[in-house]
Amino acid sequence: MILRSICLENIGLFRDPFTIDLEPGPMGACSAIVGLNGTGKSTIFEAVGLGLFGASDKLTFPSRLDYEARVRSLLRPLDGVRRSAVCGRVSLCLDVFRRGETQALEVTRRWCMTDKLEEELEVSVGGAPIPLRGRELDLWLANWAPPQRAGVVLFDAEAVYSASEEQVRRLLECAFKQAFGL
């Protein structure tokens, strides 16, 4: 799986639409995001995980309440807009390798806070929308981008330093299993 681009809108520090293009360079498809503390690096990593895996990432969000609390904390009210009317989105473009072929996968996850947190997921492969909704679409996406790979695909070194010993152990165990196909 190669992440080609990330677009955030009203997620953490990124109020206006903010796009990062990650086209592979001559050394291959490995990207690093660097910057000063407080500039949004961890938010970008977290947004990719939220966009791909949503609440399915049980390593990060043991319960739906944990997931919703984190999403709510990332959405920012616009000036003069009530907090209960706030929306945000993450859009991702990836190349996914399946059955010997590269296919373009586009994922957009939107959240709106009204009386409750509402979520919408849209996925397309090769430009063709996947005609599923809700939990069925989340399950379909998990088949293409398994949530248990989150710790391997998205590595935030700063977060490792602040993680508990148990979280680091689980992350390393997951990375080891994925690397060796166990």
Image (cartoon, helix red, strand yellow):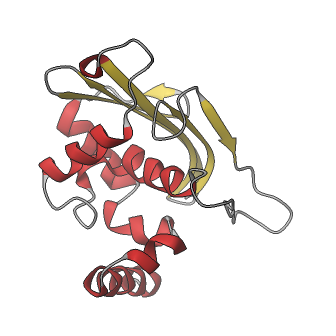
Q: In the displayed structure, does residue 89 sit left or right of residue 2?
A: left
The extreme front residue here reads 80
Q: Nearer the viewer, residue 10 or 107?
A: 10
- Residue at 34% x, 46% y: name it: 141
Residue 169, placed above or below residue 28:
below
Q: In the displayed structure, does residue 72 sit left or right of residue 179?
A: left
- Residue at 30% x, 87% y: name it: 165
Position in image of residue 166 (x %, y %): 25, 85
Q: Nearer the viewer, residue 44 or 80?
A: 80
Residue 47, placed above or below residue 17:
below
**Among the 4 quarters of the image, the one containing residue 164:** bottom left
Badge count: 0
Q: Is residue 139 visible?
A: no
**Among the 4 quarters of the image, the one containing residue 151:** bottom left
Residue 69, placed above or below residue 91:
below
Q: In the displayed structure, does residue 77 sit left or right of residue 179?
A: left
Position in image of residue 103 (x %, y %): 57, 45
- Residue at 32% x, 54% y: name it: 143
Residue 28, placed above or below residue 98:
below
The extreme top residue here reads 80
In which quadrant is the C terminus drawn? bottom left
Position in image of residue 19 (x %, y %): 64, 36
